[in-house]
Amino acid sequence: METTMKSRSNLVVSYITVGGIVIIVMMIFGILMLLAQGGVLDLPAASFYQFLTIHGTGMVGAAALAAAGVMWYFLSHYVDLSKKVMSINLVLFLVGVVMVIIGVFSFKYASSWTFLYPLPALSASAWGTVGPLLYLFGMLILGIGFLLFYLDSGRAIIKKHGSLAKGLGWDVISGKKSEKDAPSGAVVASTMVTIVNITALTAGATVLIMNIINVINPAITFDPLLAKNLTYAFGHIFANSIIYMGVIAVYEILPRYTNRPWKSSKAFLIAWTMSTVFTLIIYTHHLLMDSVMPNWMLIMGQILSYANGLPVLVVTAYGALMIVYKSGIKWDMASGLIYMSMFGWVVGVVPAIVDATIVVNHVMHNTKWVPGHFHMYMALGACAMIFGFMYFLAKEDSNMKTYILDKIAFIAFTLSIVGLSGSFLVSGALSTPRRWATHIPEWMAPAVFGAVAGVFAVLSVTVFVIHFIRYINKRNKVNAKEDLKDKKLA
Amino acid sequence: MLQTKYGFLLFVLLIIPPIRNLMESVMVVHMLVQIPLLIISGWLISGYFQCKFPGFFSKWNSNGVPGIILVVFLITYWMIPRTLDEALNAWYIELFKIVSLPFLVGIPLQDSWKKLNSLGRSFIIFNFILMSGLMAWLYIDAPVRLCNNYLEVEQKVLGWGFLIITVSIVLYMLQNVFTDHSEGT
């Protein structure tokens, strides 16, 4: 059993380490882009768009990998997951990343993460055929790895609980089972993520192959609106699911710190079911500017985006407040980051809900307002959950101590992400367009401010990751000593 | 044994020239009736070959993965519009179709399916959802005639056929994962 736990942790540690390091590298690309927009760095436009492509793809991919590690770690306490599939996903991830990097930097592919049809094939000679093929096939390989990962989690949940419906607690909602027998928060969240991400990855693979066909033979064309729908059905859901995987850390870590259980009440289960449905269909808020979209889909996108922001967020944030209230919790880096992630999630979702309003969207969607939303939401929400888990695992496994530098990094991370996101939101309010390599002087100041804030953010995250790597070293040494002792005894 | 007889009978019926020509004259029947029936004939006769050559299957397809990879590659090949055209234009491609679908798809599919675990099966089903959805989109949406032997309207009908198959599999999977599989129920 001990060996199993050790090897389980090894895989999780690999996921988190790869995720953490890639996030740092991607942050550096982000800073370089902001410096270029701020007029501080003379970066060729072609390089800017390559950076934009790698930054968007890499950030979502790395955060998804790390969050998958968090989900796997806690879900494996409740159901029997396959280590083999976990390893295959990691290998496919690395292969996919290498292909994407070669496609972007060696073959100048720069369509942004959206690979929006027909851009991969129509680049005005900015790139050729090999670059997009490497990128699109790399993404496809990444997707296959994640698809296997979620199919395995679905299989394990069905094996243990009987069905995905029971994984979501529908038998408790319908009154067939009492609340005390409800599935844990980790199982409920994992079931939701399994459902939405299998759907997203299937949609994504379809549109990726369509783009590949179009790149190989541009004479075969497709409906661009359907391609855009599938692209955002994939991208929105997959990126959104990161926080739903990360939140498992909240459900699992806060109860350990407060010695209070996180109960799966009926309200909690209903909220997760609502989010499962809404997450699948609200991607249309990315298409509010597409006037050819059916009106009912756009109206649905607005209304359900409002609705989706609330159920899980409310029950989780309220649950976190209640579980901590008068609990005598001892705050440390793990609990602090996890608790702070609630703030990042709550605050980060507000600009998104504002942007999901059709009349606002027509003005704001192509401005830096939107990066303002997702930098706050992803960095201070989802990534804070992942970093909190890193500190939790280091403490749980090896009783790693934290130092004053970690605390300074915590404060610096929080303030710098607020500053960075604030700079994007201010840029949005100034009508600064997003995804533009060059800015006019009136738009530059917030970009420079964002770059400076980004430097502090990257330094803080480096402290978090170094702490985690120190833990791996300590753990490896302890494991080596134990192995030696076992050999001697044998 | 009865199953093997039905399999051989189905195979013989499918290759009788008038029946073959009739099926191949309509694109949707060619792709969505003749090809699946050839695979089913192979599935039905697989028991005979497994009894005859047990060592071959246990040695070369012990966990079902090699067989299913062969199946996926060949099904993908036969979904490409050009292959339908070539089967009608070149006798050796037609012969390859008649031989490959029962013997290199149907038989290994039957042998692999029982050896694959639930994860492997799910992966193959989702792969098929993706492939048939993709083909639906391709055949409905392509602005050009993809096969010289069939009209553009026929490829659209075929596309809708693929879409119906895709939706059917999705609905099947939904009912499968949302209905209770607990022991004793």
Image (spheres, coloured by chain):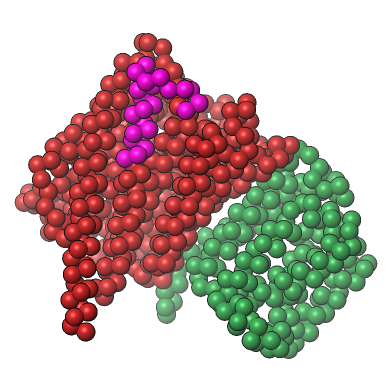
Chain colours: A red, B green
A252 relative position to A374: left or right: left
Q: How many marks?
A: 0
- Image quadrant in which the N terminus of chain B is located: bottom right
For the record, the magenta segment spans: A24-47
Magenta region includes residue A257: no
| Percent x, y of residue A200 | 49, 48
**Front one among A365 and A422:** A422
- Give the quadrant of residue B92: bottom right
Q: Is residue A271 above or below residue B77?
A: above
| Percent x, y of residue A102 | 51, 42
Main secondary structure found in the magenta portion: helix
Res B9 visible:
yes
Q: Residue at x 82, y 68 (%)?
A: B98
Res A298 visible:
no
Q: Which residue is most to the right?
A: B18
- Image quadrant in which the C terminus of chain B is located: bottom left
Q: Residue at x 31, y 59 (%)?
A: A12
Q: Is residue A374 above or below residue B182?
A: above
Magenta region includes residue A38: yes
**Front one among A161 and A449:** A449
| Percent x, y of residue B135 | 69, 51
| Percent x, y of residue B103 | 74, 74
Q: Residue at x 64, y 81 (%)?
A: B57
Q: Residue at x 76, y 69 (%)?
A: B100
A216 relative position to A126: left or right: right
Q: Is residue A450 above or below residue A296?
A: above
